[in-house]
Amino acid sequence: MLQPTPQWWRFRWDIASGGLLIACLLLFARYAVDFSIAPFEDAAMLMRYAQHVAEGHGIVWNIGEPPVDGTTDFLFMIVVAWLVRLGVAVETAVRALGMGAHVLTVGLVYLAIRTIHNGPVFLALTSALYLAVGPGMYYVAAYFGTSFFAFFVCLTWCLAWWVVKRPESGLAAVLFALSGLLTGLIRPEGVILSAIMLLAILFLLGWRRSVRVMATFVLVFLVLGGLYFAWRWSYFGHPLPTPFVKKGGGLVYLGSLQASLRNALLMGLPFLPAFVLGLRSSLTWRISLFGLLPVVGFASIFVLLSNEMNFGGRFQYATLPILLVSWYAAIRGIEVELRLPALASFPRRVRTTMMIFALTLAVGTVGYAHSLSRGATYGRDGRYDVGRMLGDYADEGLVLATSEAGLVPLYSRWRTVDTWGLNDPWIARNGGITEAYLDRFNPHVIMFHAWFSPLVAPERATPWNAMTILLKDYAEQRGYVLAAAYGATPRDVHYYYVRPDFAQSAAIVDRLRSMDYYYYTSGVRAIDFARFAEIHYQP
């Protein structure tokens, strides 16, 4: 008597694919990604806020001062703070959330192609591997919350596909709206992206079939989203995060638009031909455009923000899982429409050749994904070492003024003036730092990243240069000691000035000058151009 086939046997290839994905992720993390590096400069800012929230000080840049919304990853920061509150180190919390989110997104891409579109295992696995070895893991290594945001974008988009498949489902509409809200709570641009997804649903289904999901979406965002917006306005005193005010300013940034569209194009390049093929008929062109609308729409909104801090194209990374979930739907059924012969109808040698070619193409596609990660790497960073050193004086009531608001403030735990204004509402809203504003704090250490050195004269070509020149002039006019000017080249330098009239001044100067300082762009040991100039250019 024949035994019934076990239920799990039907999914044996999916189970095997899941095991292969986990193995590839582990091997990739072990041998391709450097997890020994310190946080990237910009990622460290969120970690400072999370640390303060976990300690019960609120969302503040400096302990004891009014709240500042300098982090744009609000919900990610809150979850990190919660883990830190439970006793997890802030570095571990950030990376654990990022890694978990990346793994879940890889799995979600696979499941979406297999279940939503009923796609073949081979194509689902290729898509998931493409995401697995792309820049996502490198964002995790750099301590960014990018993969956390990308997971909720992917989840919201999968729910959008569910709405399209089941427009009569009230549950699908509710889950789509709630997931969209969570996406918006993680990053403000998530609200815009979720709204674009809603417009894509409207485009595909039409007004009548979209009424339920539109009404649910608007209700959830008006009620729950409105309550959050009212709270944050009351808590912070203004509606938008300070970095958006600083980086936006109501201007149009055509260079940012160009960079954003280029990043989105390069990330999804191997899968874009599928959307072109989707324009082949009146039955498929709407599906193809449905998958592209959120990608193009989201990439286009960055025309309103400067492109600074866009490490490895991380701002556009969320478009990648959208493309990976959608591309197969654009070509599904094309073999029937073109009346292509089934694979089994070819001779064995031809079938073998075709399978080898498909495997080679898949390997090349996955390899291309890995090549995208080259822009998401960096080297050992001397700012981390300086922050740890200055942390020895954390309880002395000292003040730091710096253009580098990440590593040094995080690890020194000093009261800090962010001279660029990403974490200072006054600077962000008043067009920049002034000498009078610096006088309010009388900083003990002034540190800034300049495109000049004691060997290269500064130029006033950009707002950043104007700020660094102001800081340099301020320090020199008030008798600060130039402790060090570290850089890999004389046109890219970290300056450290120390006020000479406090007890720890001489010790800090000596320790700054004696450091093994490495430059983040290359990871090589930096030159102290202040000492170099003294040795080689004294009259």
Image (cartoon, grey):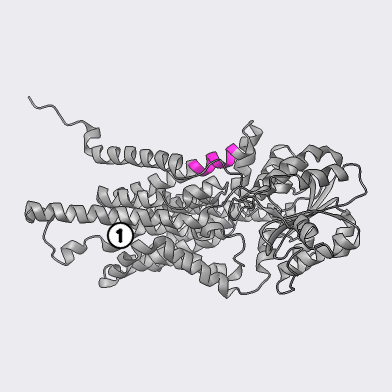
Q: Quadrant of the N terminus?
A: top left
Question: Residue at the spot x=42%, y=43% of the render?
Answer: 28
Q: Is residue 517 magenta?
A: no
**Along the line of sight, the residue nearer the viewer: 86 or 360:** 360
Question: Residue at the spot x=62%, y=52% of the render?
Answer: 520
Name the spot of residue 357 as percent of width and height, x first: 21, 56
Note whether 519 is above or below 459 in the view shown: above
Q: Majority secondary structure of the magenta segment?
A: helix
Name the spot of residue 84 as percent of width and height, x first: 64, 36
**Image check: 461 left or right of 17?**
right
Q: Is residue 94 magenta?
A: yes
Dividing the picture into quadrants, the one containing residue 245 is bottom right
Q: Tell me if residue 70 can be seen.
A: no
Name the spot of residue 406 as percent of width and height, x first: 68, 50
**Image check: 419 left or right of 222?**
right
Looking at the image, the residue that sits furthest to the right is 501
Note whether 86 is above or below 388 in the view shown: above
Q: How many marks?
A: 1
**Along the line of sight, the residue nearer the viewer: 464 or 110:** 464
**On the image, numbered disc 1 is attached to which residue?**
329
Q: Quadrant of the C terminus?
A: bottom right
Note whether 137 is above or below 193 in the view shown: above
**Along the line of sight, the residue nearer the viewer: 52 or 255:** 255
Boundaries of the magenta span: 92-99
Name the spot of residue 161 as percent of width and height, x first: 37, 56
Question: Residue at the spot x=74%, y=60% of the render?
Answer: 421
For the residue labelled by badge 1, is the local secondary structure a helix, a strand or a loop? helix
Disc 1 packing (10 Å; few <14; some 14–19; many ≥20)? many
Amino acid type for the residue under numbered disc 1: Ala
